[in-house]
Image (cartoon, grey):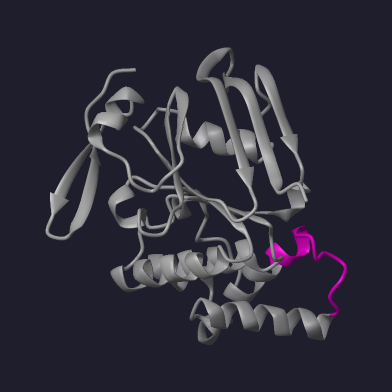
Amino acid sequence: MNNLQIELKQVTAGYQGHTVLEDVSLSIRHQDFIGVIGPNGGGKTTLLRVLLGLIKPFSGTVHYHISRKEIGYLPQISQFDDQFPITVHEVVHSGLLTGIRSGVLKHRSCNARIEEILDSVGIRALQNRSIGELSGGELQRTMLARAIISSPRLLVLDEPNTYVDNKFEIELYAILKELNKTLSILLVSHDIGTISPYIKSIACVNRRLHYHPSNEISEEQLKVYNCPIEIISHGQIPHRIIKEHQQ
């Protein structure tokens, strides 16, 4: 069985004629867990937009082996309007309406599915609360529930540990590790030291993309990849921080 889900081949992309990504190739396969790292302005968000079909590349091809409805997306919560008058239950339900299960579940089954997902991320008790009343961690849990409620085959997360509490950050990666048993994950993060025990491979994006087929990467390899990240040992847990760089 062909386990390919999305293939990017020699993709160049950007905005209004300005190139942000150049000659990028990447294959995403079933049960991949790819950590995407790189400097601000290096093209990580543009890569996600190309993968999600939100922008068309200037050149190159994007081939989908799965439906776009089978892609769950968790954006940075800073992009979400928490003043919109909507409850946690309604936010999660909106993910079901746009996902692959659209029109399949009856109302009773739909509510049961929502409660099941809310339980899995620990916020069932908050389902009737307005999103404007949530903490950053609670809002991130809500958005994760929305992203996975339609049982996607690929989950794309854009810096999900931003604005979350430490307790949920630990729980988040445990949830992702469990989800990775049945779906593939593409995770953008600045904290590669934290995510390295969970991811299976690394894509360094700095205009171009360099794929590293392992979750372990040396500072020498990062220099070869032109990825301005420094590896620092801190106790028993390695940390990597973004260096200053020039485009």
| Image position, residue 47 (x, y; %) | 54, 33
Query: Which residue does the image show at 39% across and 28% down from the upper left?
Result: 41
Residue 213 visible at all = yes
Task: Find residue 94 and report its image quarter.
Answer: bottom right
Height in image: 238 above or below 175? above
Height in image: 33 above or below 117? above
Residue 54 visible at all = no
Query: Which residue does the image show at 65% across and 17% down from the upper left?
Result: 58
Height in image: 79 above or below 54? below
Task: Find residue 70 and report its image quarter.
Answer: bottom right
The one nearer the camera, 151 or 7, is 7
Task: Find residue 96 and report its image quarter.
Answer: bottom right
Image-based side of 38 in relation to 16, left or right:
left
> Looking at the image, which residue sits at the far front?
1
> Looking at the image, which residue sits at the far top?
17
| Image position, residue 153 (x, y; %) | 68, 57
The one nearer the camera, 215 or 240, is 215
Total number of numbered discs in the rendering: 0
Magenta: main secondary structure: loop
| Image position, residue 36 (x, y; %) | 44, 41
Q: In the image, is residue 99 part of the stretch drawn in magenta?
A: yes
Image-based side of 69 in relation to 177, left or right:
right
Query: Which residue does the image show at 57% across and 61% down from the upper left?
Result: 84
Quarter containing the C terminus: top left
Magenta residues span 94-106
Query: Which residue does the image show at 36% across and 55% down from the upper left?
Result: 195
The one nearer the camera, 42 or 33, is 33
| Image position, residue 98 (x, y; %) | 76, 58
